[in-house]
Amino acid sequence: MKYGKMMKGIGVAALALTVVSSCIVGGTLAKYTTTATGQGSAIVAKWAPKFSDESGTEYSNETKVELTDTTVSKANKVTSKRVAPGTQGSFGVQVSKEDTEVAFKYSVKIGNLSAGWPENLKFYSDDTYNTPITATQENGKDVYLVIPEATMLLDASTTTVSKTVYWKWPFETGVGESAVAESDKKESELGKKDEAGRSMSFDISCVATQVE
């Protein structure tokens, strides 16, 4: 009799435990859920620094700046499209940030002067030819800083920086009769060469780099 009551009690307890467990499981599975989706986007800032001549024609690898095109007129004294002692002129370089959406550093250099370049033909930063552009050395070669490194900021009011480069080949160079004679001799020898030997060239290097 006692045994039967005990078994009946165990059965009731087991049933109660089952009900409690079911409630717990049921409570765990019942929950609110919400799902939402969105979309991200970005536009890359435009990179378009522009280097051009004084007329606004953009520089490219095919651009040629000919000193003969800017020679001061020497009517009936020097053939057109030629340079010689006594000629002078200029050309322009412009840097623009108009279409660029990041700040950048920039510089303009003249370098890689060809062999046989006239010693007395110099570049100047002023139209009075009193301030020559001093050559610096890069990799053992002369480089002329037309525009030393500067920064173009987005919040600056200036959108374009212009620089005129002047050049001049003095008619006579040297102090004293001996020095003048020596200079005349070198320049005369250059003028006697064939056209290939009289053809000179130089590079204009325009570099823009984003500011970090």
Image (cartoon, rainbow, N blue to C red):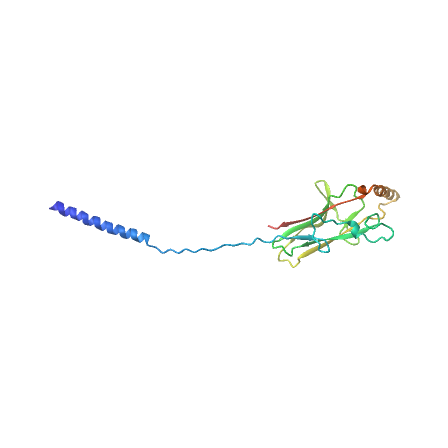
* Relative to 204, 189 lies left or right: right
Toward the left, the furthest residue is 1
Residue at (22% x, 51% y) in the render? 16
* Relative to 129, 208 lies left or right: left
Identify whether 38 is placed above or below 84: below
Toward the top, the furthest residue is 140
> Is residue 162 something that shows in the picture?
yes
* Relative to 23, 53 lies left or right: right
Residue 21 locus on image (x, y percent): 26, 50
Residue 120 locus on image (x, y percent): 81, 45
| Viewer-closest of 194 and 137 | 194
Residue 47 locus on image (x, y percent): 62, 52
Toward the bottom, the furthest residue is 157
Toward the right, the furthest residue is 177
User: Number of marks in the image?
Assistant: 0
Residue at (88% x, 44% y) in the render? 177
Residue 193 locus on image (x, y percent): 83, 41
| Viewer-closest of 111 and 26 | 26
Q: Quadrant of residue 156?
A: bottom right
Residue at (30% x, 53% y) in the render? 27
